[in-house]
Each structure stands twice: as structure tokens, then as C-alpha cells.
Image (cartoon, rainbow, N blue to C red):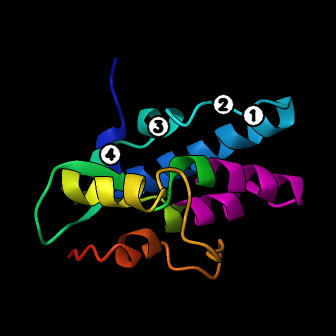
Amino acid sequence: MTTNIAKHTQAEQKQRAIKRLAQIFRDHWEEGRVGSTRIFEHVVPDAWLICARSSSGGRYREHIVPCVLIRDQSMKMYQAGELVEAVAKMIERHLAIVLISEEEKNRMDKQRGWKTTMPEGWEFGSGDPFARLTSCGIEFS
């Protein structure tokens, strides 16, 4: 079997994968299904999402916005009549990974309780996608 993947850059492949993820969420919404957040890692490889590393180092892959929130926001957008392209743009803006330390992970997940949530008052569209990290004092570049 011959593949045409070499015709696309990694950035193009990432765009295609994000649009595919948005379409999967559309299909789930139409079927009345929620679906597991594990779908993210199966459709969009983590390697394409790593955008930074904390200044203290670390290897823990922290999504800047929890996948469950991105999935749920996708469903809300479809319920409001949005198109796949709009959902794909939302996913692209909020789906990224920063590598952090175990201590930083514990600070965010356990001390702040933000494993699957964002800081109080944060909203899609107007909120900084990196708010969980910066609110915990995690520095990254």
C-alpha cells in the first residue's frame, strides 16, 4: 500500500487531524454519544501538540485546556448550530501540551483542583488557554 502522507507537512497533517477530530465530535453529537477523551491521542499525536516545557523541566504531558472541556465545548458549539470548521478552529486554539514536572502537575491537579477544569471565570473564546499553568505559577517557554 502506498501512502500520500509525504505530500503533507507536519503542520498540514496536524490541521487535517484536528478537522478530523472536529468531524468525529460532530458525528458523536448527531448520534447522541459523548465519546471518550482518549480519542484525542488517537487522532492527533502528542508530538504534534507539544508547544513548550516548564522552566523546571519535566516530562509530564499537560494539556493546556483539559480534553474533556474541549470535547464538551465542541458538543455545545454543534448544539448552537456551529459548523465543523468553527469547531476545528476552537480545538486548534485550545489543544496543546506543555511538558511540566510531577510537582507542578500535583500543584495544579491536587492543590488547585484543576485536573479537568479551568480557573474560575475562565471561558472559551475570551480566556487565555494557558490560564491553568500561569495561575499555578508555572513558567514555560
User: Which amino acid does the dot numbered 3 rest on?
Assistant: Val
Indicate the position of residue 22 as horizontal and vertical percent values: 64, 48
Label 3 or label 1, whichever comes before in sequence order: 1
In this view, the mark in front (2 or 1): 2
Quadrant, the N terminus: top left
Label 1 or label 4, whichever comes before in sequence order: 1
Task: Pick out the residue farthest to the top.
Answer: 1
In terms of image quadrants, where is residue 101?
bottom left
Label 2 or label 1, whichever comes before in sequence order: 1
Mark 2 and mark 1 residues within 8 Å of each other at the beta carbon: yes
User: Which amino acid does the dot numbered 2 rest on?
Assistant: Gly
Q: Which residue bears the numbered disc 4?
A: 46
Taking 26 as reference, is 30 left or right? right
Q: Which residue bears the numbered disc 2?
A: 35
Query: Would you place residue 131 above or below residue 84 in this image?
Result: below
Which element carries disc 2, helix, strand or loop? Answer: loop
Is 117 part of what is drawn in magenta? no
Q: Residues within 10 Å of mark 4 (few under 14, many from 20)?
A: some
In terms of image quadrants, where is residue 62?
bottom left
In this view, the mark in front (3 or 4): 4
Q: Which mark is residue 43?
A: 3
- The range drawn in magenta is 70-91
